[in-house]
């Protein structure tokens, strides 16, 4: 969730801000469609429509809200297509702005939805929702030494019950790396856990395109360590997945959030370097003592404006705390820090 470069927000395919509504051609037969995310600092999500002889395949679906659905229908009409022509969704990961509209469109028109198997535990938790059960993030905040965030998060989520009609299971679970036929294209589905355990990117090597979801974003870094069913080493997974994508050819970056960018390699290198800097900052923040993840997050700067944790709203403070935890856990795995417990609060020391 930490901003890095202030790279231009103007997308080369549109010549305007990347959130500007439209159906922007990024390659022959491929269109970028920004859909709105009200009440979300990201502002929009790019879904990508791939034209085939049998209809449309969409990379990601958007958030199942009326304003998004209306704009999706208009954007497709602008290129002479219709939402009924969407035969398939390849969803990069389970977050609501990527997954839920795919599910609602499928219910109406029978589109086929694919999702990474690693995101099944999150869907399982959503479907097993118990009105009296505590949100699993609350225990994470308490262990991170952030009782105030735990309390505010509990108040924030107490009366929120998911609409299960938006969270049906996919038709197909993607597992490991595999090749998919999309019309006359052969697309590599590459498992890239980190942002979520089931995250996938889709590489069209012949066309030189990387549909990157939230794994590689051009102007911000994706949140790490914020899942209800948490991986053991989310940052380690993320950095390994970045290295894996670095091993692909250098492709045009088609992100879920932000402008189209010319080089996947260049941005991967920046993201890897960014997290190494953050790891060093974590070690420096601990010094010779022992601190909780919340203590360390309170010392670190956040966003490209270098805000203090205390200046963030509860949602972003929660993201920051758990992302710091992910950095500290990787440092423990590397042998750079130790890990202890003080009455249920995890403490990290040199």
Image (cartoon, grey):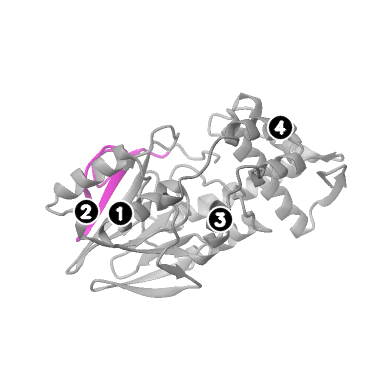
Magenta-drawn stretch contains 20:
yes
Distance from label 1 to label 3 (Cα)? 21 Å
Q: Quadrant of the N terminus?
A: top right
In percent of width and height, residue 166 lies at: 41, 50
Q: Nearer the viewer, residue 159 or 38?
A: 159
* Residue 66 in the figure: left or right of residue 143: left
* Residue 275 in the figure: left or right of residue 117: right
Residue that badge 2 annotates: 83
Q: Residue at x 45, y 61 (%)?
A: 169
Q: Which labelled disc corresponds to residue 82?
A: none
In percent of width and height, residue 338 lies at: 83, 52
Q: Earlier in the sequence, mark 1 or mark 2?
A: 2
Q: Residues within 10 Å of mark 1 (few under 14, many from 20)?
A: many
- Residue 333 seen: yes
* Residue 129 in the figure: left or right of residue 181: right
Residue that badge 1 annotates: 105
Q: Which labelled disc corresponds to residue 122?
A: 3
* Region rendered in magenta: 7-34
Residue that badge 4 annotates: 299
């Amino acid at each position: 969730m930490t901003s890095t470069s202030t790279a231009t927000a103007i997308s080369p395919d549109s010549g305007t801000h990347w959130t500007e509504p439209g159906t922007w051609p990024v390659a022959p037969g491929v269109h970028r469609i920004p859909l709105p995310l009200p009440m979300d600092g990201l502002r929009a999500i790019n879904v990508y429509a791939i034209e085939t002889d049998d209809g449309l395949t969409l990379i990601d679906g958007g958030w199942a809200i009326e304003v998004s659905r209306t704009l999706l229908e208009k954007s497709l009409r602008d290129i002479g297509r219709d939402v009924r022509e969407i035969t398939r969704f390849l969803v990069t990961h389970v977050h609501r702005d990527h997954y839920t509209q795919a599910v609602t469109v499928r219910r109406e028109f029978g589109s086929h939805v694919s999702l990474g198997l690693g995101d099944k535990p999150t869907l399982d938790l959503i479907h097993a929702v118990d009105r009296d059960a505590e949100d699993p993030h609350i225990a994470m905040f308490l262990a991170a030494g952030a009782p105030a965030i735990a309390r505010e998060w509990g108040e924030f989520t107490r009366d929120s019950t998911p609409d299960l009609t938006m969270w049906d299971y996919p038709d197909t679970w993607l597992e490991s790396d595999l090749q998919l036929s999309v019309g006359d294209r052969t697309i590599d589905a590459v498992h890239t856990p980190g942002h979520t355990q089931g995250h996938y990117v889709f590489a069209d090597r012949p066309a030189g395109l990387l549909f990157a979801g939230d794994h590689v974003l051009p102007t911000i870094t994706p949140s790490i360590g914020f899942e209800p069913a948490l991986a053991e080493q989310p940052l380690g997974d993320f950095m390994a997945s970045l290295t894996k994508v670095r091993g692909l050819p250098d492709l045009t970056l088609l992100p879920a959030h932000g402008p189209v960018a010319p080089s996947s390699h260049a941005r991967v290198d920046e993201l890897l370097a960014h997290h190494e800097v953050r790891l060093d900052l974590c070690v420096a923040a601990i010094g010779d003592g022992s601190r909780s993840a919340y203590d360390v997050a309170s010392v670190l700067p956040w966003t490209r404006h270098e805000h203090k944790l205390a200046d963030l709203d509860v949602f972003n403070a929660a993201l920051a705390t758990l992302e710091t935890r992910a950095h500290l856990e990787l440092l423990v795995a590397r042998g750079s820090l130790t890990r202890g417990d003080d009455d249920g609060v995890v403490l990290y020391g040199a």
